[in-house]
Amino acid sequence: MLFELRLTDDQSFVEHRDTCTRIDHSSVRSVRVEGGDLWPVVAFQKSGLIYACLPLVEEALEPRPPLLTIPGLSQGLALLFGILDYISPSRKNEAELSAKAGQLRTLIIQACPLGTPLNTNISSLSSSFDDIQVVPTDVKQPAWRSNTYKGKPQVNVCITEKVKCMQYDKRDVVDMWQVYGAVNCKCDIEGAAPNVTLTLNLPTNGSPLQDIFVHHCVTSVDPAMLMSTSVNPLDDSVYSGPYKFPFIPPSESFNLCYYTSQVPVPPILGCYQLIEEGSQLKITVNLKLHESIKNSFEYCEARIPFFNRGPIAHLEYKISYGQLDLSREKSLLVWVIGQKFPKSSEVSLTGTVTFGDIGEEHPTDYVCTGNTAYVKMYFRIPDFTLTGCYVDQHSVQIFAPGKPKITASRELISSDYYIWNSEASAPTMYKSLYY
């Protein structure tokens, strides 16, 4: 396994592993053993640890079946991600990591009695054998429902959209932005196999959802909904909803579906100019909130890092709104805009920065050399999505006794939201042929 993951000391070229024709599209690998090739092995490396499992395949292996036809792969990957979520918070504390690793066997016995994953949320399990639950015997109860809830039915749904963005403010470079959404559900409902139907809606001017990927508990879906894709820009297949998902929910919190969307404009438009004048840098940052965006943030700030330079020795600045802070390491400016943009929806920052001598403790970056630099935005807007996607609480159908309590929320969060210096070169994803 170490050899397949390229983690051995021998870094020489091995054709069957390192050839350009072999591209890793997934975490599914083939491991060479004495008896031949062991396949499929699900394995990946994260933070110095290797997570691996051997899924059961109940069909012929020659020729190798398509990955999507092997249920054990998704179950194994879900289990490994559950273990990752359980282990990850303790990575920097060796004592805590050792204790968690010691409890893992007990937890996996609960999560996978007889080898079948019933609950992949390892963190929700008890490390005591006394609390291990009996494997369900109801033939109607699916494997992903590890226990039966008792109490008033309630459903919590949260739509989280993350927006990624690369802005350049250049004529020959196209700005890029993309929305990634996830619909998280927690259904506390009595019964071995309760049926729930949840519908996602878009307003009239909403942006269609694309690349929809659903949880395995979804029992049926409109094929047209899955055909809308962003992979082929020439594909004109558009499905504008409603997006209906009938499902039998797992006991724990889960993501019902993922999606992408190409919205017409990014939420915050920006321009960053950094010019070197003698021994100092002159910076100008202009930000504008688009008129279609809800002007109500939980937080909103612009971070301006300075790489491959010494500490900031002198700073003079003028801002039209908010406040400007200097990090303790004196290598980062944090412009706190706050919870609202002003009525004009525009804010600006100008200033000059002088640096001291560079030391080993100051941040370096292989991309941001010379005047190549960026502003990175961090924000969260509650009760808002960029696509307009929402859950109508009255449209949620639950086929179980009792009147359910339904809670729906949504949020927009920035993710890798960069505004590059327009006065220098910058890494680009795509260059326009038109000037």
Image: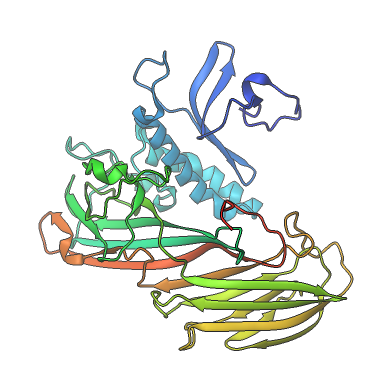
Residue 252 in the image: x percent, y percent? Answer: 33, 52
**Visible in this render: residue 146?**
no
Q: Residue at x 72, y 24 (%)?
A: 13
Which of these two is toward me, 58 or 347? 347
Report whether 91 appears left or right of 399.
right
Q: Is residue 339 above or below residue 64?
A: below
Report whether 226 appears left or right of 104.
left
Residue 90 in the image: x percent, y percent? Answer: 58, 54
Residue that lies at the very extreme toward the top in this rendered image: 35
Residue 189 in the image: x percent, y percent? Answer: 20, 55
Q: Residue at x 17, y 35 (%)?
A: 139
**Visible in this render: residue 346?**
yes
Which quadrant: the C terminus? bottom right
Residue 396 in the image: x percent, y percent? Answer: 18, 60
Which of these two is toward me, 130 or 57? 57
Report whether 357 appears left or right of 44.
right
